[in-house]
Amino acid sequence: MTEPAFVDVLRASRNIADTVVHTPLVPSALSADHEILLKLETLQPSGAFKLRGATNALANLDEAQRRRGVVCCSTGNHGRAVAYAARRFGIPATVCLSELVPANKVEAVEALGATVRRVGASQDEAQVEATRLVEEHGMTDIPPFDHPDVIAGQGTVGLEILEERPDVTSIAIPLSGGGLAAGIALATKTINPSIRIVGISMTRGAAMAASLAAGKPVEVTEVATLADSLGGGIGLSNRYTFDLCRRYIDDVILLEEASIYAGMQSLFNVDRLVAEGASAVSHAAYLDGALPVDGTTAFVISGCNVDMRQFTSVVNGEPVEVGELTIGGKDIA
């Protein structure tokens, strides 16, 4: 496979049109001084942007691959997207999830008819099981980010932003394995090279951020975080997203858990959106003063598949347990 190109994003837009929602881009009440727009990927049928890449990847399979089925590892949202797209295409799907994946996301994958395997304490360990199934049963692996079809599918988010608002000057994107950031950056910087791309992650186990800082893919320890969708490694043999992110991302911001907690509160209290911690990182970075907004800026609100008990505690200012940490305890929005 070769690195995805802009034409692949255009093809992906056609491939996914019947399955994926063209999500709205709406004004945020977060800033009175500059226009902030929210790209609501929370409105996808699977609850997150991941449906774009998964649908494009499955649409490009041949008939033999479809018969043998697909497998993936995931921190939750990709597995849900693969399960949804596989059911749409009539393809058997197995999703490998680590023990860190919240129960609500496991249940959602199972509800879509996919087989779930809980394996290991990290996404990397879940990937070992996915690789075994490929080798022993001939299934096709649908990676959560490091795949040209997945990257191209995620890039359609960028196409839609610029189709609606070509005056956007910056895009803030939750950063994990880099599929979303790489795809959006590829699409938007091809159209307008001056667009500023900002990747935002947590300080606890930010694999792409650590890899960019090191100048090569590196391993990190995956730990619990409010932004659980941003967990997981990028793979030491990363073929696509690391290079694309290194080439196209202009800035990376890392957030403490307390900031993500405040971002979740702000996303709900200011913009009335129920969303997971990964979706709130742009709000969090803005509130921290780490994300200056100069010109029209788009925040990608990546998904809504949050544990509602945890979410309710956060928006009510109650303490929540995040691994060994206790976060919150008062309304800090």
Image (cartoon, rainbow, N blue to C red):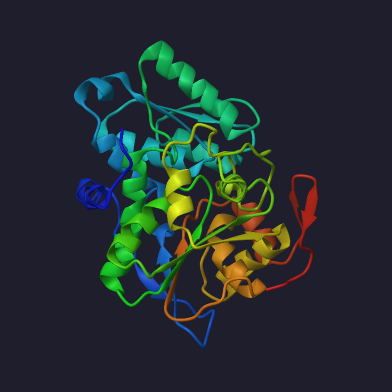
Front-most of residues 169 and 87: 169
The image quadrant that residue 298 belongs to is bottom left
Work out which residue is located at the far top of the displayed protein and give it: 136
| Residue 265 x/y as whole percent | 63, 68
Query: Splitting the image into 4 quarters, where does residue 111 fall?
Result: top left
Residue 295 in view, yes or no:
yes
Counting from the top left corner in percent of width and height, residue 305 is at 51, 51
Residue 180 seen anywhere in this rendered image of the structure:
no
Residue 167 position (above or below residue 18)? below
Q: Is residue 127 left or right of residue 18?
A: right
Q: Residue furthest bottom?
A: 33
Q: Is 264 rendered above or below residue 108?
A: below
With 60 as the anchor, is 252 left or right in this view?
A: right
Taking the spot 24% from the left edge, 35% from the top edge, the residue there is 60
| 260, above or below 293, in the image | above
Residue 324 occupies quadrant: top right
How many numbered tags mark residues here?
0
Above/below status of 258 relative to 247: below
> In the image shown, does 328 or 210 lie closer to the viewer?
210
Residue 131 at x, y = what percent? 47, 21
The image position of residue 242, as x and y in percent, is 48, 44
Q: Residue at x 52, y 27 (%)?
A: 127
Q: Which residue: 41% across, 63% down? A: 40
The quarter in which the C terminus is drawn is bottom right
Drawn side of residue 270 relative to residue 23, left or right: right
**Residue shown at the point (31%, 40%) measured from the top left:** 149
User: Left or right: where does residue 76 sit relative to residue 81?
Assistant: right
User: 320 and 281: which one is in front?
Assistant: 281
- Quadrant where the N terminus sits is top left
